Image: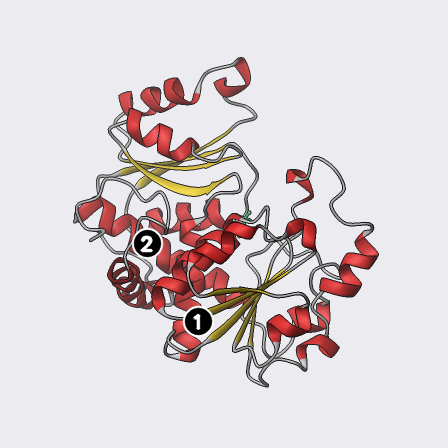
């Protein structure tokens, strides 16, 4: 069980029961988030540091809010403006935070495995807020929360994941979660951005076209193009990418009429998804953001108290 663990580093290490336990706790936390008095004492007397070596709006802010709603003291360290710029190592930074009595460190890093290295070297609980192309576990948990809230189940659902799969830690964590929970995953993207290891992750089908992947889909997860992780051009032009892989009303017709449209954000409007689809009736992109706070409250509560 997640209870008794020091850290949350990835979905790969969680069981189906762990994931459902977090989602159930997040249901209770959502009542707090939606109430007029967003205050519970579950992290009273605890401290949380967000240690972000990469940019973030949603993840960093929702961890800060989650900890504050539960009564913790929190602070943020960004790579720019900290001693990281003077060359301080990740382990030394972690030990420095430990020495200040930090209870939880939430880390985002461009290197896959950085949170695991930190977790081995600090007393604080470590939560992975995205490590390179590896995992983004709390994004997957909020995605699962949103899917379960809307569809009421995972078994038998057809979930399409579209776009830059190769560079996407969201695609990796979502696929681990969805296959553990009993959904079928269909993946489509440019051939240069389709990693073959996905086929080994469970009930996953690699598709040759977006239309094949989203045919009769219950859920479509559109991924952001991660230009910052591409060392060379992996598709000819953004215009062509958008034409073949961008989610438009015409492509959406292939999915079920009540298919959910999801995107982890930030959205590149007009590239991986049209504004019409992103803002349309089937979109739950803003609800994903709301659910992110509840899910992160649940994770922090479990790590601090169980
Ligand atoms: N989805 C996500 O990780 O968004 P941010 O980069 O804004 O945190």
Q: Which residue is drawn at 64% across and 58% down?
A: 163
Residue nearest the observer in this picture, 8 or 175: 175
Q: Which x, y percent locates residue 242?
A: 77, 61
Earlier residue among tags 2 and 1: 1
Viewer-proximal residue, 230 or 212? Answer: 212
Q: Which residue occupies the foreground of this view, 177 or 195? A: 195
> Residue 196 placed where, x, y %?
55, 52
Q: Bin the neighbour count of mark 1 within 10 Å (Cα to Cα): few under 14, some 14-19, many 20 and up.
A: many
* Residue 137 shown left or right of residue 191 in the figure: left
* Mark 2 → mark 1, Cα distance in angstroms: 18 Å
Which numbered disc covers residue 88?
A: none
> How far across and down, in percent of the image, does residue 266 sit?
61, 53
Q: Name the residue under label 2.
A: 297
Point 76% across, 64% down: residue: 244
Residue 97's place in the image compared with 35, above or below, is above
Residue under label 1, please give it. Answer: 147
Does residue 36 show up? no
Query: Badge 2 local density, few (<14 within 10 Å), some, or many (20+)?
Result: many
Q: Is the C-beta of the residue carrying label 1 under 8 Å from the nearest atom of ligand 1?
A: no
In the structure shown, which secondary structural element does the residue marked by tag 2 occupy?
helix
Rendered view: 154 above or below 6 = below
2 or 1: mark nearer the eye: 1
Say left or right for 189 vs 148: right
The kind of secondary structure element at disc 1 is helix
């Amino acid at each position: 069980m997640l209870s008794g663990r020091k850290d949350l580093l990835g979905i790969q290490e969680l069981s189906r029961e762990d994931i459902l336990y977090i989602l159930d706790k997040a249901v209770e936390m959502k009542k707090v988030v939606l109430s007029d008095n967003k205050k519970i004492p579950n992290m009273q007397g605890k401290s949380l540091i967000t240690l972000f070596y990469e940019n973030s709006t949603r993840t960093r802010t929702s961890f800060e809010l989650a900890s504050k709603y539960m009564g913790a003291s929190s602070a943020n360290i960004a790579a720019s403006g900290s001693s990281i710029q003077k060359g301080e190592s990740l382990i030394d930074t972690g030990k420095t935070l430990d020495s200040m009595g930090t209870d939880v460190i939430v880390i985002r890093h461009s290197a896959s495995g950085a949170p695991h290295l930190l977790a081995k070297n600090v007393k604080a609980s470590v939560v992975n807020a995205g490590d390179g192309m590896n995992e983004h576990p709390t994004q997957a948990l909020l995605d699962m929360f949103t899917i379960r809230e809307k569809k009421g189940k995972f078994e038998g659902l057809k979930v399409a994941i579209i776009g830059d799969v190769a560079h996407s830690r969201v695609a990796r964590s979502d696929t681990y979660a969805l296959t553990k929970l009993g959904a079928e995953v269909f993946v489509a993207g440019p051939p240069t951005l389709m990693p073959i290891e996905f086929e080994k992750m469970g009930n996953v089908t690699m598709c040759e076209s977006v239309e094949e992947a989203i045919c009769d889909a219950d859920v479509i997860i559109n991924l952001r193009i991660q230009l910052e992780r591409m060392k060379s051009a992996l598709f000819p032009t953004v215009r062509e990418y958008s034409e073949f892989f961008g989610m438009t009303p015409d492509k959406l017709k292939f999915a079920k009429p009540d298919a959910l449209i999801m995107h982890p954000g930030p959205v590149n409007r007009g590239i991986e998804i049209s504004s019409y689809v992103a803002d349309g009736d089937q979109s739950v992109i803003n609800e994903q953001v709301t659910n992110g706070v509840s899910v992160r409250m649940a994770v922090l509560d479990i790590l601090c108290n169980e």
